[in-house]
Image (cartoon, rainbow, N blue to C red):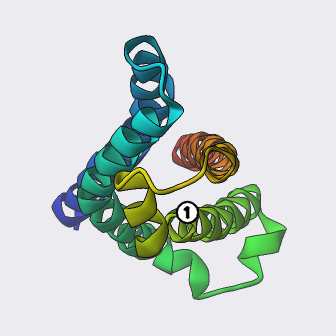
């Protein structure tokens, strides 16, 4: 059904826009802006945690929808696993799947770094500067990896769509 396929593709694209666009916004727009507004690394981290928690309310459902619609869009390929390694489409799909798994693992680590107790210490100004700096560095690295993986996944999605 062309209409059903178009609807699934549209939902997939909207979810990708939310996930990737939001991630890029946080790293390229909000984080540098906060540096110009606040000298305190602790204050910037507090704001980023609040914004990140808010973003997660739409990002996580978007990621789940992306995975579900991605699986749906690929079901015809899973019927013959051999095509995953014997065709360009299958190879690109396999690379995309591996990148999605890496993205999920990276995202889980990123979220788990800021456990509730760590978040509470930061929000109540009870974390040491050393703890804040170490946490900030990890968050930045994991955030950058998340964005790079997300953009790479988009690239392979474009390759699949183009039938390369």
Dot 1, how many residues are within 10 Å of its Cα: few (below 14), some (14-19), or many (20+)? some
Image coordinates of residue 152 in percent, x first then y, are 65, 43
The C terminus, quarter of image: top right
Q: Quick one: 117 or 35, which is closer to the camera?
A: 117
Q: Secondary structure at mark 1?
A: helix
Up/down of 103 relative to 22, above or below: below
Which residue position holds label 1?
A: 107
Name which residue lies at 63% across and 63% down: 106
Q: Quick one: 145 or 47, which is closer to the camera?
A: 47
Name which residue lies at 73% across and 73% down: 84
The N terminus, quarter of image: bottom left
Q: Quick one: 113 or 110, which is closer to the camera?
A: 113
Image coordinates of residue 99 in percent, x first then y, are 68, 60
Could you tell whether 143 is left or right of 138 in the image?
Answer: left
Could you tell whether 18 is left or right of 96 in the image?
Answer: left
Name which residue lies at 34% across and 65% down: 60
Decide if residue 102 is in sight here: yes
Q: Quadrant of residue 93?
A: bottom right
Image coordinates of residue 49 in percent, x first then y, are 38, 50
Image coordinates of residue 133 in percent, x first then y, are 66, 43
Up/down of 108 relative to 46, above or below: below
Up/down of 65 relative to 9, above or below: below
For the image, the number of numbered tags is: 1
Decide if residue 115 is in sight here: no
Name which residue lies at 64% across and 54% down: 131
- Extreme right residue here? 86
């Amino acid at each position: 059904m062309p209409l059903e396929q178009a609807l699934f593709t549209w939902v997939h694209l909207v979810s990708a826009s939310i996930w990737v666009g939001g991630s890029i916004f946080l790293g390229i727009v909000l984080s540098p802006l906060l540096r110009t507004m606040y000298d305190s690394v602790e204050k910037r981290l507090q704001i980023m945690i609040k914004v990140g928690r808010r973003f997660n309310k739409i990002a996580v459902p978007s990621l789940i929808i992306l995975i579900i619609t991605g699986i749906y869009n690929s079901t015809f390929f899973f019927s013959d696993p051999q095509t995953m390694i014997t065709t360009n489409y299958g190879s690109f799909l396999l690379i995309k799947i591996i990148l999605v798994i890496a993205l999920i693992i990276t995202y889980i680590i990123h979220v788990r770094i800021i456990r509730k107790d760590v978040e509470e210490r930061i929000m109540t100004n009870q974390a040491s500067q050393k703890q804040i700096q170490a946490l900030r560095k990890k968050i930045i690295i994991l955030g950058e990896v998340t964005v790079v993986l997300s953009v790479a996944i988009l690239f392979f999605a474009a390759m699949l769509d183009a039938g390369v």
